[in-house]
Amino acid sequence: MHQQSQTGYLDMELLRFTTAGSVDDGKSTLIGRLLYDSKAIFEDQLEALEKASINRGEEQLNLSLLTDGLRAEREQGITIDVAYRYFATPKRKFIIADTPGHIQYTRNMVTGASTANAAIILVDARNGVMEQTIRHCYIASLLQIPHIIVCINKMDLVDYGEQVFEKIQHDFNGFSDKLDIKDIRFVPISALKGDNVVERSSNMPWYQGPTLMFLLENIHISNDQNFVDLRFPVQFVIRPNRDEFHDYRGYAGRVAGGVLHKGDKILVLPSGFSSAIRSIDTMKESLEFAFPPQSVTLTLEDDIDISRGDMIVSPDNLPLTGQDITLMICWLNEKPMRPEGKYLVRHTSRDAKCIIRNVNFKVNINSLDKDYSDAHIGLNEIAEITIRTTQPLFYDSYRKNRITGSLILIDEGTNETVCAGMII
């Protein structure tokens, strides 16, 4: 690959999307079809796929084998872990998080979807909207995934009927109105036959909308970041101690919100000291400005004591600061939550300890009802809780900023991540 095209590839926009659906809705086949039809499979992979399909006695290429790489999955014919796949077209780069459909793997879906720009939710045209579908939509809305694409799959098995598509769309809109979903699209497809995945389908002339691939390539994602509220959690203080950088003191981190400009007035939390940005540096160059999700090093006009876990913000746009924090959580650990238990909390680059103050309610993941009487939170369960931290956190609501609005809880004894939380 010559230099120019390589640079072009690195500069291409990256779309992260997650796939979710019930077991056997055809997620793995759909991802295989996307990779196959967009020419993202190597020759040797294709040969191995052909051999594996023949060995299994299948008449045509089994595209689901491309993604079901784990042996236990292949033997059971299901997806049990989050599998990440990478591919690119001339317009965009993609990272797919292929997440499992079973209720007992809710935590895997939360993990795979937490950074996604879009979620593809598969519905089997023969079965319509099921409990699983409602659950996946709820998690997508909980994680504030900006774009939802509902793929009504296996249209070939219902004679490509328009009424089937319209009924599922109607049923879906019936419950999605209650959820906080900004952008929702519907595409009738057959992952097995390739209808409306990458190429338009001649079997469904009644559908005038875009193909799935067109949506993925053109969906507008640059507004998915928060460019308004300046948030820069400091991860590392850089002191090179070399003659050429004798007095250099930089603060490295990733821009979590807003746009930083050289010369901007800033405020440092928790100290409350103010200064101005002298330079915005990367490994190769100094920048005039920086924005999410860039990783940069800032130098300031004044010599202020700043350390990891501090946050640089705009003086006239402050985050919330507090120790009593209410969050929606998904419990990720086999050991249930301990009432009034003590945990480590990691929020942006800041670490603290916390105690579980209260379980406000638990969500019945199938009916979406709130249960105020049950305070037992076990693996894969979703609840609203209140925690008390040992030192103040600087945060926004998750709805406002997915980085400063999220945190994890860690078990002090085992060092395992036990919970993912979204601040309300």
Image: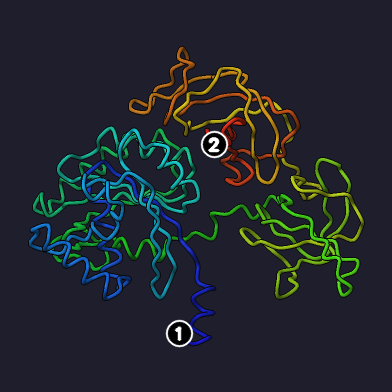
Which disc is residue 88 wearing? none
Question: Which amino acid is tagged 1?
Answer: Met
Q: Is residue 112 above or below residue 386?
A: below
What residue is disc 2 on? 416
Q: Secondary structure at mark 2?
A: loop
Q: CA distance from mark 1 to mark 2?
A: 42 Å
Judging depth in this view, the residue of 377 and 204 nearest the camera is 377
Q: Residue at x 45, y 29 (%)?
A: 382
Position of the C terminus by quadrant: top right
What residue is disc 1 on? 1
Query: In the figure, residue 54 lies in which quadrant?
Result: bottom left
Q: In the image, residue 310 lies at what x, y percent?
A: 77, 45
Q: What is the image's colouring?
A: rainbow
Judging depth in this view, the residue of 317 and 69 nearest the camera is 69
In screen coordinates, is 315 left or right of 72? right
Query: In the figure, residue 225 lies in which quadrant?
Result: bottom right
Q: Residue at x 48, y 32 (%)?
A: 330
